[in-house]
Image (spheres, rainbow, N blue to C red):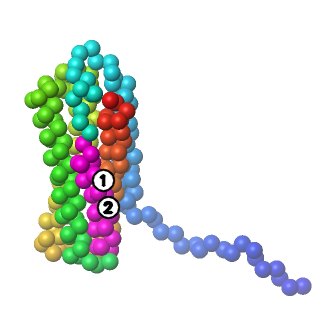
Amino acid sequence: MSAMANPFPEAPTTWSLPDRGKVAMAGLIIAESAIFTIFVVAYLFYVGKSLSGPTPSEVLETPILYTICLLSSSLTIHGAAKSLARDRVGAFLGLWLLTIALGGLFLYGTAQEWHRLIYKHGLTISTNLFGTTYYSLVGLHGFHVTAGLVMLLVVAIFALAGRVRMQESRRVEVLAMYWHFVDAVWVVVFTVVYVLGR
């Protein structure tokens, strides 16, 4: 009697651990997402409950250009990481610097908006509930963008010094994960503050 063939081929016995950097960044992103969720819920809960003005509809202007800049930077950092993985260091550096420029433009737009709100409309963090929740939420995001830009600048300095090569592509991908998170959070913040909250 012939032996029957095993219909279930054996799975390979080798298994490798996931990249520690990516696992650590995923953990950080999960923790930061919880913090942002609290701030978003607080903003939505208190919007429209201020006893005095100004209100969001009176003072907020939708930052479409700066939003496009920030969201475009996700494409450029993705391209930069892929370029480095293919050992195209020149293309990596160009796209990396473009990412920094786009993130910087976004921060400039946030600073312009805050200047206008404070000096033209008198809206500060202590003016009313809207001011408190607005500056807390948008400021938290701005802090994360600033932290990301500092990290991107450090990598750019090393790259300009010729110290970033294909071997560092996995580390660059970890940093790109953080930047994608910052961009994804802005989609939520933009929707909550400039669409639903007005």
- The magenta-colored residue range is 63-85
SS state under label 1: helix
x and y percent of residue 121 in the render? 14, 26
Residue 41: image tag: none
Q: Looking at the image, is 160 positioned above or below residue 29?
A: below
Q: Quadrant of the C terminus?
A: top left
**Residue highlighted by disc 1:** 71
Which residue is found at the position 12% from the left and 72% from the top? 161
Q: Is residue 116 visible?
A: yes
x and y percent of residue 41 in the render? 38, 30
Residue 70 among those drawn in magenta:
yes
Q: Amino acid at mark 1?
A: Leu
Q: Is residue 178 visible?
A: no
x and y percent of residue 67 in the render? 27, 48
Q: Are marks 2 and 1 in contact (CB under 8 Å)?
A: yes
SS state under label 2: helix
**Residue highlighted by disc 2:** 75
